[in-house]
Image: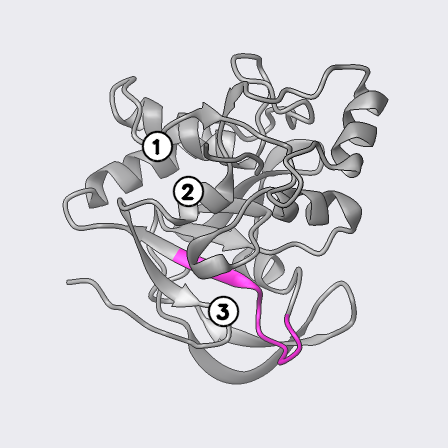
Amino acid sequence: MKKLIFLFLVGLFFIPKILFSQSGAQVPAYDFSLFKEGDLLFQDIDCGPLCDAIEGVTQGHQGFDISHMGILVKKDDSLWVCEAIDKVVHLTSIPDFMKRTSNRDGDPKVLGARLIDGYSSLAKKAAKEAIKYVGTPYDSKFSDGDVSLYCSELIYYSFKNANGGKDFFKLEPMTFNSPETGKILEEWKKYFIELNIPVPEGMLGCNPAAYSKSDKLDIIYDSGDFIIKEKE
């Protein structure tokens, strides 16, 4: 059973500038010129117990902790990250997205992905669909079919709309259980008690960790390794 919860980069070249994360850590700045519209960014956000709970029931590409994702969109000839985070879907600059968290070496805790050959036109269409959702409320209940969106749900519907109403990525039964115990994590129990709703165990949904392992994506950047995979 695949698991739940909550774009990225292409070709990062190091340049001698410094950004600062919210924790105060220094983060290298990069030349973003090789990014493309429709690339996906996967992120390990250090937001405390909730992000730990997200990562506790999901596992991303090669075991990478992933609790968030977004898609690169074009506005006024510039690329932005379109993401569902905090209270609403909005656009975030790539530098601000990158400096949100960093590892011990000061590198952004981000994976970058691009659709495999044959889907490039769909990626651009999905980016244009995603930007239409700017201003949509954040879906804190992780419920499908309402007017709000969580991060990977934004990606799911953007690609579905771009694909003529047909699923591109899939919805899968969600789980909030610990892989070790098979029981719902205490943090999730507390979270949904505060929302006054049952834990949506088994309901259909999506999560960024599962999407990072999709066979429809090439990982083009692995945090800290500065791997560049240029596509023709």
- The answer to which of marks 2 and 1 sits earlier in the sequence is 1
Against 124, residue 39 (above or below) is below
What's the distance in space between the residues labelled 2 and 1, CA to CA?
8 Å
Q: Nearer the viewer, residue 179 or 113?
A: 179
Q: Which residue is mark 3?
A: 223
How dense is the environment of label 1, judged by Cα within 10 Å: few (below 14), some, or many (20 and up)? some
Q: Secondary structure at mark 1?
A: loop
Give x and y (percent) for residue 23. Answer: 78, 66
Q: Which mark is residue 169?
A: 1
* Residue 46: quadrant of the picture: bottom right
Label 1 to label 3: alpha-carbon separation:
24 Å
* Label pair 2/1, CB-CB below 8 angstroms: yes
Give the CA separation, mark 2 to mark 3.
17 Å
Give whichever of 191, 36 is nearer the camera.
191
Q: Is residue 108 magenta?
A: yes
Say left or right for 142 vs 25: left
* Residues in magenta, as a range: 103-112
Q: Quadrant of the C terminus?
A: bottom left
Q: Residues within 10 Å of mark 2 (few under 14, many from 20)?
A: many
The residue where tag 2 is placed is: 211
Magenta stretch secondary structure, dominant: loop
Residue 22, picture quadrant: bottom right
* Residue located at (70% from left, 21% from top): 199
